[in-house]
Image: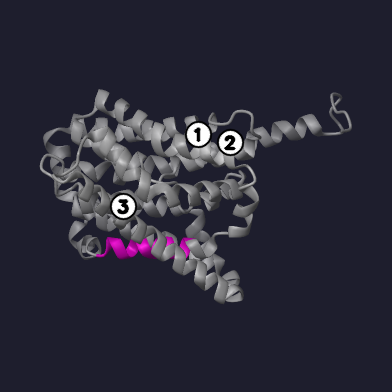
Amino acid sequence: MMRFVERYFWAICIGAMLLGLFVPQACMPIARIIKWLLGTILFFTGLKLDFRAAVREIRRPWLILYATAMMMILLPLGMYLLARAVLPRPFAIGVLILAAMPAATACSSLTDIVKGNPALALVATLVTSLLCPLLTPWVVSLGSGLTAGNGAAFLLRQSSFLAMILFGPLGLAFVVRRLFPAFVRQRRELFGGLSIAALAMLIAGAMASVSADFTGLLRDTPGEAGRLFGFMCVFSVVLHVTGWFLAPWRPPADRAALSVGAAYVNNGLAIVFAVEFFKPLPGLGVAAVLPAILLEAPMTLALLPLKAWLARIARKDGEVDSPRDPAYRPR
C-alpha cells in the first residue's frame, strides 16, 4: 500500500489540491494545523535520510557551495525579476518566497526515482536547509524590500521560525535513527507513505484556506489566474533546466540531482512561512501563498519527463558500451 502511495504521490498531491479548492469546508480544520503537518513531513522524511551517504559527497565541498549559492541566492532573485515582468508585484513576492526555500527533504527519494545521485541530492537538501534560516529572510527582504516596520526584528523572527520548524523535526528524526536503527530500517517504506499523506493534508488545508480568494480570482480575473498558473509551470521548467546545466562537467546522475534540488523547493515550508509572515501584510494577502500551492501540479508532473530523459541517456550510454556495438572498445 505504501509503495503505491510513493509511486503515485504526484496524483495524490494534485488530488489534495483539488479537494481543498472545491471542498474547502471539509478541509478547513486541517488548515489550522499546517505547521504540525510540516513538522510531521520533515520528521518522517528525516527518518529515511541516509546521512552516511551525505558524508561521502561532502568530499566535493566547492560543488556544494557553488550549487547552494545558485539555488538559494541567484536563482530566487532571478525568478523574482522574471515574475515582476509578467505578474503583479504581490504574486511576484510569493514567487520570491517560494524560490528562496531550501531543497525539499524528499529530493533524495525523487532523485533516486529518476536514477540520479541521491547522495548528492541529500547533501544539497541538508546544506540548503542548514543555511535557510540565515539566507531566506535576507534574500526575500533584498528582493521585495519588505521589512514590516522594524526590519531587523522582522528578519530575526523569520530566522528563528525557520530554524525551529526545520531543525526540530529533523533533529528528532536523527535521534530516533540513532536509538532505534533496526526499527527505522524495517519501516522505511511506511515512513515515506506517511510523509506523503501528511504533505497531501497540508496541501489540502492550505488550498482550503485560500479557496474563496482563488475562486474569486478565477471568477473576476480568469486571465490573471491563468497567467499565474502558467508562470508556475515556467518556474518549474526554468529551475529544472537551470539545475541540469549548473554543473555541465558532472555526469548525468549528478546533474539530475542538481536539477531536482533546484526545482523541487520545499513548497510546504514556503506555504507555512508565507502564511505566518506575509499573508497578514497589507497588499499581499493570499497572493503570497498561491504560488507555493499552484506549483504542486507542475512540480510533481515534471518528474516524469526528467525520468524519461535520464532513461534515454542511460540507454544511449549502454548502446555505446555494448560489446555488440562496432564502436565498442574495452576500457
Disc 2 marks a residue whose amino acid type is Arg
Q: Which residue is found at the position 55% from the left and 70% from the top? A: 177
Q: Is residue 192 visible?
A: no
Please provide the residue range marked out in magenta.
Answer: 33-45
On the image, numbered disc 3 is attached to which residue? 159
Q: Nearer the viewer, mark 3 or mark 1?
A: 3
249 up-or-down from 34: above or below? above
Specify the color scheme: one colour
* Mark pair 2, 3: CA separation: 30 Å
Q: Nearer the viewer, residue 146 or 329?
A: 146
Mark 1–mark 2 CB contact (< 8 Å): yes
Q: Which mark is residue 221?
A: none
* Mark pair 1, 2: CA separation: 7 Å
Label 2: state its secondary structure.
helix
Q: Nearer the viewer, mark 2 or mark 3?
A: 3
92 up-or-down from 58: above or below? above
Q: Mark 2 Cα within 10 Å, few/some/many (few <14, many 20+)? A: many
Q: Which residue is found at the position 44% from the left and 34% from the top? A: 239
The mark that comes first in sequence, 1 or 2, is 1
Circle count: 3
Residue 12 in the image: state x and y as whole percent: 40, 55
Disc 1 marks a residue whose amino acid type is Gly
Residue 134 in the image: state x and y as whole percent: 36, 47
Label 3: state its secondary structure.
helix
On the image, numbered disc 1 is attached to which residue? 243
Left or right, 51 with reference to 243: right
Dominant secondary structure (helix, strand or loop) of the stretch shown in magenta: helix
Q: Which mark is residue 255?
A: 2
Label 1: state its secondary structure.
helix
